[in-house]
Amino acid sequence: MTEDREPAVYLAWACSLRMLVDPASSLELLPPKDGLLGLRVTKSVAPPMDVWFDGDRRLSAIEWRKDRHVFSELKEVGGFRYASRVVGYKLDGKA
């Protein structure tokens, strides 16, 4: 997925975690931050995207471009757990 696309397409791709197994993606382990484990994804997305997981290896946040998307309020359907709420924040502190 290297062609130009709407940013939401890349975020959905990251939320599905398929970005992490794409052969075009390069992954780098990030230092822990706020108790989260992080991976930086490059080559398949520009600028690099940071994907953060909690201690149970669930997607917790995505930082990309100037935004941070935080996932919360886990729900379970058919044995599958997913975040039912996503809140976006500007990383530069601006609204």
Image: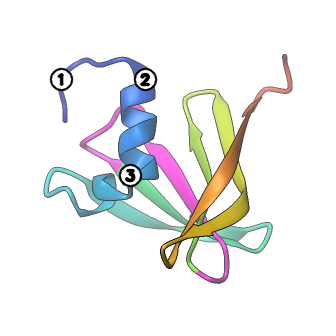
- Quarter of the C terminus within the rendering: top right
- How dense is the environment of label 3, judged by Cα within 10 Å: few (below 14), some, or many (20 and up)? many
Which numbered disc flags the more N-terminal residue, 3 or 1?
Answer: 1
Which percent across, then down, holds residue 75? 66, 64
Disc 2 marks which residue? 7
Which percent across, then down, holds residue 53? 60, 68
Label 1 element class:
loop
* Amino acid, disc 1: Glu
Please identify the quarter of the rendering in which residue 67 is found: top right
Between disc 3 and disc 1, the foreground one is 1
Which percent across, then down, holds residue 69? 66, 41
The residue depicted at 19 percent of the width and 56 percent of the height is: 22
Vertically, is 50 above or below 82? above
Disc 3 marks which residue? 41
Bounds of the magenta segment: 42-56
Disc 1 marks which residue? 3
Label 2 element class:
helix
Which percent across, then down, holds residue 93? 86, 26
